[in-house]
Image (cartoon, rainbow, N blue to C red):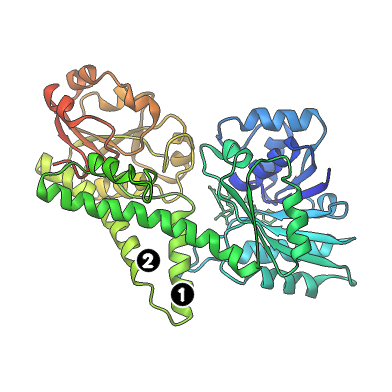
């Protein structure tokens, strides 16, 4: 079993630290955010992620998982350090590497012995070389080290499951032995291992996210055409997905992709291509369709209601997807902003994300449950497909709303049933 440090305790870092400890390694997880570490040191997760509290508790009880704010507590004894800091979107759409560079510098400052630096953050191609340069420049005396890219593919909402049962693991490095050593840390997992060079590993992550985003924008474009030819995109997607060459995943037409990864990663890849003299036509179209999808959603509502001024709109779902409290780049934010700009009064309900959104958005009437949000409302917008919204008592909703208008951004409900119940119902791509 190995001695591991994890830098950054966000969604990726905390999951990685807790799961590596569960695999039997000794893990110290580090964050510069003192408030996060204070909560983690009480044994409480700082994010909502199914199963995380159990995995964390096991690690803490076994004495294999520790948290700190100090590089000098985490790095000197470590054989491997995983870097899982944020790589947010910079001002021109590029990935901002400020946290990666700071982490590299701090790791170098605390290193006492040979170390393998494993990058989990999603980074532009070549970042591993930048990390190596910064570490080399900041070491007090010569210590051997390697840099390995081990991109993360977990999905928020099923992060623990994804970590423990990955489709594949990718390790890329100029130092093949180091890549194999990092792969060895996961030897208990039954999965495909791909060892590559550094640049290829970094590119696999961007290409994967860009491809999934492309599927979503593709089906949303098909949905727009479906609305014009009187076809049902949900059934179209089902028919496409049964083809093994296509498969069913990421073919749900709706309000578009959001979250902390797809928007920034597609943009960063496009931006990187442009700085290298290549114009990424397809990626640009993917992003444009995605932005328009949110606008079209509000437009659909405006058309049904004949205007939005002073209308009371119930928004169900704020997280960018179900089973997470993450609202980064969530469609709900653009939709609510647009509703408010047009003079609508917004009520909202989300099972997990309300405390997070409350910190960044004002002027919303946050409600205790979906029915409180819907009571007296002129329309209900379904923005996130939480499981509990599938089983709402629709006839009760119909009774308590002022006008029975439902605009369903996730095609959660059956149009025929909704019409039979007396709703004015609009889905996406289901004319
Ligand atoms: P996050 O913002 O939730 O967490 C990042 C953490 O790093 C924060 O707690 C922050 O305080 C900490 N940090 C910043 N600078 C630091 C430093 N110098 N030293 C120590 N800690 C520092 O981010 P996240 O969602 O976990 O994403 C991390 C990376 O993983 C990003 O590159 C992201 O693109 C990628 N990724 C994310 C997901 C996901 O679903 N969230 C999935 C795959 C890959």
Query: Which residue is labeled 1 in the image?
Result: 273
Mark 2 and mark 1: Cα distance apart in space: 10 Å
| Residue 305 placement (x, y as % from top left) | 12, 39
Res. 417 mark = none
Which of the 4 quarters of the picture holds residue 237?
top left
Q: For this rendering, which residue is in front, 85 or 16?
A: 16
Whether label 2 touches label 1, CB < 8 Å = yes
Secondary structure beneath label 2: helix
The residue shown at (76%, 50%) is 184
Q: In the orientation shown, which residue stands out farthest toward the bottom? A: 277
| Residue 397 placement (x, y as % from top left) | 23, 21
Within-10-Å neighbours for mark 2: few <14, some 14–19, many 20+: some
Q: For this rendering, which residue is in front, 315 or 54?
A: 54
Q: For this rendering, which residue is in front, 189 or 161?
A: 189
Is 1 displayed left or right of 159 in the figure?
Answer: right
Task: Check the picture and name the quadrant holding the C terminus.
Answer: top left
| Residue 403 placement (x, y as % from top left) | 14, 28
Res. 283 mark = 2
Q: For this rendering, which residue is in front, 81 or 302?
A: 81
Q: Is 349 rendered above or below residue 215?
A: above
Which of the 4 quarters of the picture holds residue 113?
bottom right
Is 32 displayed left or right of 126 in the figure?
Answer: right
Which of the 4 quarters of the picture holds residue 106?
bottom right
Is 264 displayed left or right of 390 in the figure?
Answer: right
Q: In the orientation shown, which residue stands out farthest toward the front? A: 244
Q: Is residue 169 visible?
A: yes
């Amino acid at each position: 079993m190995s001695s591991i440090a994890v830098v950054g305790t966000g969604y990726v870092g905390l999951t990685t630290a807790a799961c590596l400890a569960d695999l039997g390694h000794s893990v110290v997880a580090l964050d510069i955010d003192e408030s996060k570490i204070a909560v983690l040191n009480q044994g409480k997760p700082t994010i909502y992620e199914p199963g995380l509290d159990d995995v964390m508790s096991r690690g803490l009880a076994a004495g294999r998982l520790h948290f700190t704010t100090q590089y000098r507590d985490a790095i000197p004894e470590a054989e491997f350090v995983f870097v899982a800091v944020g790589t947010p979107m910079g001002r021109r759409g590029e990935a901002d590497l400020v946290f990666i560079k700071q982490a590299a510098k701090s790791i170098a400052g605390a290193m006492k012995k040979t170390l393998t630096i494993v990058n989990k953050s999603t980074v532009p191609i070549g970042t591993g070389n930048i990390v190596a340069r910064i570490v080399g420049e900041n070491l007090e005396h010569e210590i051997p080290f390697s840099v390995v890219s081990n991109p993360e593919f977990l999905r928020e909402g099923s992060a623990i499951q994804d970590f423990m049962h990955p489709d594949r693991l990718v390790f890329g490095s100029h130092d093949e032995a180091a890549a194999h050593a990092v792969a060895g840390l996961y030897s208990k997992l039954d999965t495909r291992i791909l060892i590559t060079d550094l640049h290829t590993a970094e590119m696999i992550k961007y290409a994967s996210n860009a491809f999934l985003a492309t599927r979503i924008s593709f089906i949303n474009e098909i949905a727009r055409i479906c609305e014009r030819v009187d076809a049902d995109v949900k059934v179209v997607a089902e028919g496409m997905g049964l083809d093994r060459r296509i498969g069913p995943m990421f073919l749900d037409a709706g309000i578009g992709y959001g979250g902390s990864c797809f928007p920034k990663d597609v943009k960063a890849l496009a931006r990187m291509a442009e700085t290298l003299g290549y114009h990424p036509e397809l990626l640009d179209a993917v992003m444009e369709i995605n932005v328009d999808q949110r606008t079209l959603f509000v437009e659909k509502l405006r058309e049904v209601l004949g205007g939005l001024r002073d209308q009371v709109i119930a928004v169900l779902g704020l997280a960018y997807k179900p089973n997470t409290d993450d609202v980064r780049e969530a469609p709900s934010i653009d939709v609510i902003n647009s509703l408010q700009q047009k003079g609508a009064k917004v009520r909202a309900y989300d099972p997990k994300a309300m405390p997070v959104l409350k910190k960044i958005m004002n002027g919303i009437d946050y409600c205790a449950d979906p029915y409180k949000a819907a009571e007296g409302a002129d329309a209900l917008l379904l923005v996130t497909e939480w499981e509990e919204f599938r089983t709402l008592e629709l006839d009760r909703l119909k009774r308590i709303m002022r006008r029975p208008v439902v605009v369903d951004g996730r095609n959660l409900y059956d149009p025929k049933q909704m019409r039979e119940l007396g709703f004015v119902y609009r889905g996406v791509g289901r004319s």
